Image (cartoon, helix red, strand yellow):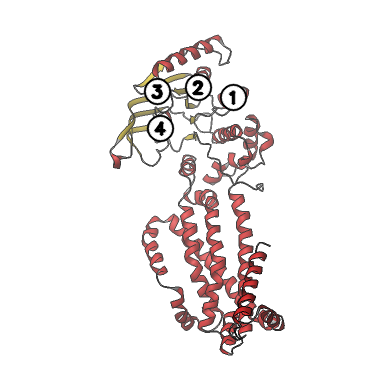
Amino acid sequence: MTACAPVPGLSFEGSVFADARTGARRLLGPLSLTVAARRWTCLLGPSGVGKSTLLQAFTGLPDGLRMDGSAVLDTGAQPLGQGALMAQDAGLLPWLSALQNVWIGSRLRGERPDHARAKALLEQVGLGAQGAQNCTRLSGGQQQRLALARTLYEDRPVVLLDEPFSALDVATRLRVQDVALDLLRGRTVLHVTHDPAEAARIADDILILDHSGLTPVSVPQHSKLADDPKVQALTSDLTRLLLEAA
Amino acid sequence: MKYLLPAALILCLWQSVVWVSDVPAFILPPPAKVAVTLWGNRALLAEHAIVTLSEVMIGLLLGAILGMVTALGLAMAPRLDRWLKPVLVLSQSIPVFALAPILTLWFGYGLWSKIMMALLIIYFPVTSAFHDALVATPPAWLRQAEVMGGTRWRVLWFLRVPAALPGLMSGLRLAAVYAPIGAIIGEWVGASRGLGYLMLLSNGRAKTDLMFAAVLVVAVMTILLHAAVNRLACKIENKSRGQAEPSL
């Protein structure tokens, strides 16, 4: 991404329904979501309220789901060409090495893979030594870090993350979060998570999604360090809100 | 190795039938007589086996290529799929055996009518297996590729084809067993060389032991061919499923 490229925000307006043939069942909404440009927005909520569905609305819903409304960039354009997606399922290609999985986007677009950058990204997520290994030999947490490296390699102005750190141990999680925070600074990030501590630490904006809809939570200025008292206070506030929502 | 025990069992059964029923050798020759004939006629059998083997190999190669190209075409052009799929299925309702005389008429008594038989008999299994696998790429992978901005042909080449290789391999395994059937039928209908021709010839002259020897050679040839294809298929499947070290 060039430094002066415009970074759009995201907006969703409408509802999502399950397969209409069996009688449309509303899965999500009606609601309206705005993700501010250049900010890291966390979508927090209990399992099953449609957080992932809301994320998928921007990249294309799975078969059997239908959207009534719009999910677009705030420029009005479709997000497909400008976003990078890290889905909950790592979706690694089993016949490729870790490194080849990082630059698969280049291959699919017909660009020359940037070996140096892919290697550097693997180093940064702590997989420098595993580049030549087959990705199926990696542990669950390593696969998740690999998927994150692949998402970061895409270098897009808009980044959609679905539970990107869920399989990582605490120490690795904090380290990888720092890498993501650093590399995604100035991008528009929509990050789905069910972990209040994660949201409290890294989000610029937090929205809680439950069955009644979206509720914004005010986020104080803080150091983005896990042991910052403000982060810990926000974590307990979020936990309380989630308990009330459940 | 795994064929040794069944082979020994069949030999025992065969020999027992010969002993118990006391059939004349021109109806059912004992295994030992077939073995002697096999060794005594090894040059003759080899000469005809080479003909059949080349028909099978060329038919297998061309049929596999044609099947793969068709499957790719169908996968890339859904409209073509709608028109061509019924034609393909319909073509399967005609027994290939019934086509053998026509193919001999069209392609002559030489290699080509047999190659065409082998090709026709494996074309559908290869096409069908590969096509089914090509349209079964996990939707999550396709979505990811779409978000990445992958082009249609590159997504086909770098994602759908590698993911579909195990499917193609099951088609090829079937093909390795079917192709010799096609070639032999072709030779029965009209040929002057090949193991099928030799079978008919020795049968007509009551040289049942030579016929059995020819059948044995066909069987061994098919088993070896299947084993070779299977070996290649296992390698490719392991790579596709990520069980082998990738080559960087």
Q: Chain of mark 1?
A: A
Q: Residues within 10 Å of mark 4 (few under 14, many from 20)?
A: some
Pointer 1 residue: A173
Of callouts 3 and 4, the N-terminal one = 4
Question: At x 60% / y 84%, what residue is drawn?
Answer: B208
The tag earlier along the polypeptide, 4 or 2, is 4
Residue position for label 3: A209
Q: Which residue is mark 2?
A: A195
Q: In the image, are marks 1 and 3 on the same chain?
A: yes
Secondary structure under tag 2 reads loop
Instruction: Give the CA distance from mark 3 to mark 4.
Output: 12 Å
State the residue lying farthest toward the front. B20
Q: Answer above or below: position of A104 versus A246.
A: below
Q: Residues within 10 Å of mark 3 (few under 14, many from 20)?
A: many
User: For this view, does A134 lie left or right of residue B159?
Assistant: right
Which of the two residues, B21 or A143, is positioned nearer the viewer here? B21
Q: Earlier in the sequence, mark 2 or mark 3?
A: 2
Q: Which mark is residue A53?
A: 4
